[in-house]
Image (cartoon, rainbow, N blue to C red):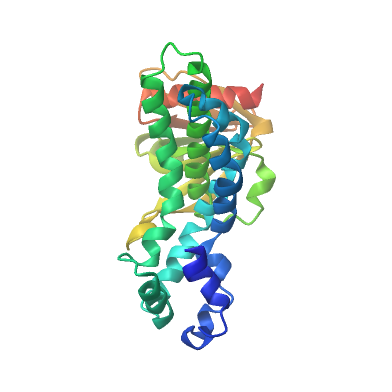
Amino acid sequence: VLQGYAAEMDNPLMAHLISPELQNKKDILFGNMEEIYHFHNRIFLRELETYVEYPELVGRCFLDQMEDFQIYEKYCQNKPRSESLWRQFSDSVFFQECQRKLDHKLSLDSYLLKPVQRITKYQLLLKEMLKYSKNCEGAEDLQEALTSILGILKAVNDSMHQIAITGYDGNLNELGKLLMQGSFNVWTDHKKGHAKVKDLARFKPMQRHLFLHEKAVLFCKKREENGEGYEKAPSYSYKHSLNMAAVGITENVKGDAKKFEIWYNAREEVYIIQAPTPEVKATWVNEIRKVLT
């Protein structure tokens, strides 16, 4: 891909096949694939090869390089832009010519998906290895490596949702790390509100997608998009946020194991939040408690 497509975009002999709108878009189309390639080629592959005789110790290899795996997050975040560019130009003569020269049966987009598939495959491979390494000396490292890779996958997944937030006028990076995101039923009860609003609010929940950052929790409304691939990915229109410094939490709401309360400014605003399962509720309550303490 890097030699047969990316490099060809800079080849003067191919320039006449590239439409003007596609020029200078190499970084959008390929993201940081080159960085991923060099990491594997120069670092990770060599590390792996030192464990050929001792496969059960391979967990160490992942742990040593765990920070580098975050390059996948960057790749995945760019993927929607890359896909939309590909859709515009997929029938370009330039791409057809590159594919013909490479003698590839599949078009470029199948290969651009590889890094995304690769990062999700590691956890499956590590799970398999763990299965057969229960009592080996490397088992703990394998387990830790699996946990770390799952952490990276969660971060990748969360950030894919976060980049789909629209209408937030601040800078999301200033809210600290994104800790959790998910969909909930939400009821509101505001002291200041009109009595009517209060009664209505009690019965019909709003569907809200919550993003919990270290410094704030964002309430968004999910909009499903029509289309294929990443076009089908939802977007989230920002509704409001609460500063974690003024938030309080009530962990149990009478009569429903899936509900908890977030309140703001000494209960001036109360949000009753219903998770899809008691387990999801427990995870969120734990994370919020950590932020508050």
Residue at (63% x, 57% y) in the render: 169
Percent coordinates x, y for residue 290 in the rendering? 61, 23
236 vs 107: above or below? above
Position of residue 161 measured from the top left corner of the image (x, y, whole percent): 48, 48
Given the current orientation, which residue lies at the most extreme top position?
Answer: 135
Given residues 65 and 288, the one toward you in this image is: 65
Q: Residue furthest front?
A: 53
Q: Nearer the viewer, residue 138 or 199?
A: 138
The x and y percentages for residue 216 are 62, 38
Question: Quadrant where the C terminus lies?
Answer: top right
Q: In the rendered image of this protein, does residue 221 appear above or below residue 147?
A: below
User: What percent of the width, then of the height, locates residue 118?
Assistant: 43, 45
> Looking at the image, is 6 positioned above or below residue 183?
below
Residue at the left extreme of this rendering: 105
Whether residue 194 is visible, yes or no, is no
Front-lying residue, 236 or 137 = 137
The part of the image, by quadrant, that contains residue 183 is top left
Is residue 202 placed above or below 292 in the rendered structure?
Answer: below
- The answer to whether 47 appears left or right of 123 in the picture is right
Give the number of callouts: 0
**Residue drawn 36% across the image and 19% down it:** 132
Is residue 4 shown left or right of residue 46?
left
> Is residue 220 in view?
yes
